[in-house]
Image (cartoon, grey):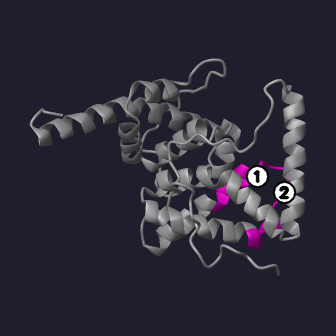
Amino acid sequence: MPEFRISTQKRVFPSGVDVHAGVSAMSTPLALSAAALAEQTAQENAAIAHGLKRQDTDLLDRLIDTYQHRLMRYLTFLTGRRETAEDLFQETWIRVLMRGAQFNGKARFDTWLFTIARNLVIDLSRKKTMASLDEMQDPGDDERPFEVATDAPSPYDQFRLRENAAEVTSVLLKLHPSYREVLVLRFHEELPLEEIASVTRAPLSTVKSRLYRGLASLTPELEKLRSERNLTTGGLA
C-alpha cells in the first residue's frame, strides 16, 4: 500500500484554520447551468472514486488541501474542542484512505467525508461513556417546515451579519448538538437539506425542524450570553 504521509503527524494548518472561513470545495463558473454543474460534479466524484480505489496519495493531498478548512470547522463545532477536532481530522483522512474503495462516486464527496467524521465523533463519545449524537434527541417536537430562500440572504446569514462573529460562534457552541450540526452543515458548508439528512441519518422533515428550532434559538442565546457578560463586568461591557 502506498505510504500515507500524514498518518503519524498532525496536519499543519496554514496560518491556522478559521472556523469562520468560507472555503468552497469547488470553483465553478457562475454561468454554468444547473444541469452542467450536476454533470461536472458527477465527473469530479467519479474521478475521486477512481483515485481512492487506487489509494492515490497525491489525490488525497489535493482533497485535504480542498476540504481541510470545511472539515476542521465542522469537527470544531461538532465537538466544541479544537484539540479533539484536530485529532479527529487526522483520523478522518486515515479512514478516507483506508476505506476509499467504499466511495462509489454516486454521492457527493463532501457528504461522504462529513459522514465519516460524524461517525468518528460518535465513536469517541461512546468510548468516553457520553451520550452519542444519535442518542441526543431533538428536545423539541416542532415539525413546522423550514425552507431556505435561494435568492436572498438566509435567516442565519442575516443573523451573522448583524452580530459579532465571535459571539455567534459562542452561541452556536451553546446550542443543542442536533441544532448546531444542521446549522453548520447548511449555512457554513452549504449542503442541501437532502445531503444533511444523509449525513445525520435523519428524515428530511426532522432536518427542517432542527433548522427552524436552531435558528429560533440563536437570538435568545445571544441575549443570554450578553446578559451574563454584563453581570460579570458590572454592565461595563
Amino acid type indicated by mark 1: Phe
- The image's mark for residue 109 is 1
Label 2 secondary element: helix
Identify the residue at image location x=36%, y=44%: 170
Would you place residue 206 above or below residue 131 in this image? above
Dominant secondary structure, magenta? helix
| Callout 1 secondary element | helix
The magenta region covers 97-116
Mark seen at residue 144: none
Location of the N terminus (image quadrant):
bottom right
Q: Residue furthest top?
A: 151
Q: Examine the rendered structure and indicate whether residue 137 appears above or below residue 158.
A: below
Residue at the spot 61% in from the left edge and 36% down from the top edge: 205
Q: Is residue 104 visible?
A: no
The three-letter amino acid code for the residue at tag 2 is Ile
Q: Can you give x and y, in whole percent of width and height, for residue 203 in the image?
A: 64, 43
Q: Residue at x 86, y 59 (%)?
A: 49
Q: Position of residue 194 (x, y in %)?
A: 70, 39
- Expressed as whole percent of the image width and height from the top left, the position of residue 9 reads 59, 75
Q: Is residue 31 visible?
A: yes
Residue on which the image places disc 2? 48
Q: Earlier in the sequence, mark 2 or mark 1?
A: 2
Q: Nearer the viewer, residue 143 or 178?
A: 178
Tell which tag, 2 or 1, sits nearer the viewer.
Answer: 2
